[in-house]
Image (spheres, helix red, strand yellow):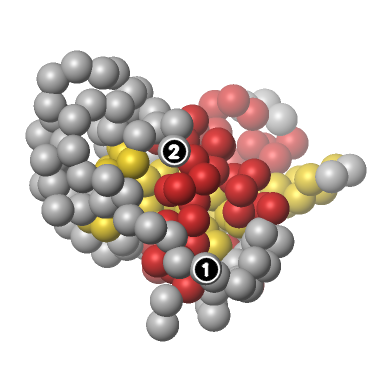
Amino acid sequence: MTSPPEASASQPGQAPASPKAVAFVGFSNSGKTELICRLLPGFAARGLRVAVLKHSHHQDLDREDQGKDTWRYRRAGAHTVALAAPGLLQVSYSFPGEPPLTQVLTTLAPEVDLILVEGYKSGPLPKVAVLGTETGKEVEVPNFPHLIALVSGRPVDSPLPVFQPHQLEELGNWLYDYLTRD
């Protein structure tokens, strides 16, 4: 198994020059969401404002708020609907198809230093493949484009950096260094 590379000494609190994005990809139930949730406090401790984008192939995701005012506004033809409440501003935009990744990233960028993306396996972003947490036999590395690192609880033979799921600090430092390179 390949060991994670040594992290360089980056300036704490130094945000990437412009919002950077990295995608976490893997098969269903591989641990992507959990990994992102566990990395967020480390980036926040560096003073970074982080957005998370979850990609889904499912349609009709607005069923959860069916009948609510925001759902009614979208159904009536509103292009953009916002919900403001103490501690929350939630904005949704309507699109005839899937919104282009570049447009979504551009929309998020002015508010954040870093965008963590779950999904977009075939997209153009640099990717960390999450291969699952089970231990045991060696796992094959999926052929996702633009892979930069792997997270696996199993042995992996790869020239890419490989992190164990519990190596949050090491992965966070490595990603921070990767994303702040010029």
Instruction: Tell me which label, 2 or 1, sits earlier in the chain.
Output: 1
Eyeballing the image, is 162 above or below 31? below
Q: Residue at x 22, y 60 (%)?
A: 146
Q: Residue at x 17, y 49 (%)?
A: 144
Image quadrant of residue 177?
Answer: bottom left
Secondary structure under tag 1 reads: loop
Binning the other alpha carbons within 10 Å of mark 2 as few (below 14), some (14 to 19) or many (20 upward) gives few
Quadrant that contains the N terminus:
top left
Residue 128: x percent and y percent?
A: 32, 49
Binning the other alpha carbons within 10 Å of mark 1 as few (below 14), some (14 to 19) or many (20 upward) gives few
Q: Residue at x 33, y 23 (%)?
A: 133
Residue 39: x percent and y percent?
A: 54, 43
Number of numbered discs? 2
Residue 163: x percent and y percent?
A: 33, 41
Label 2 sits on residue: 167
Residue 23 vs residue 87: left or right?
left
Which numbered mark, 2 or 1, is in the foreground of this view? 1
Residue 45 vs residue 120: left or right?
right
Label 1 sits on residue: 9
Residue type at mark 2: give it: Gln
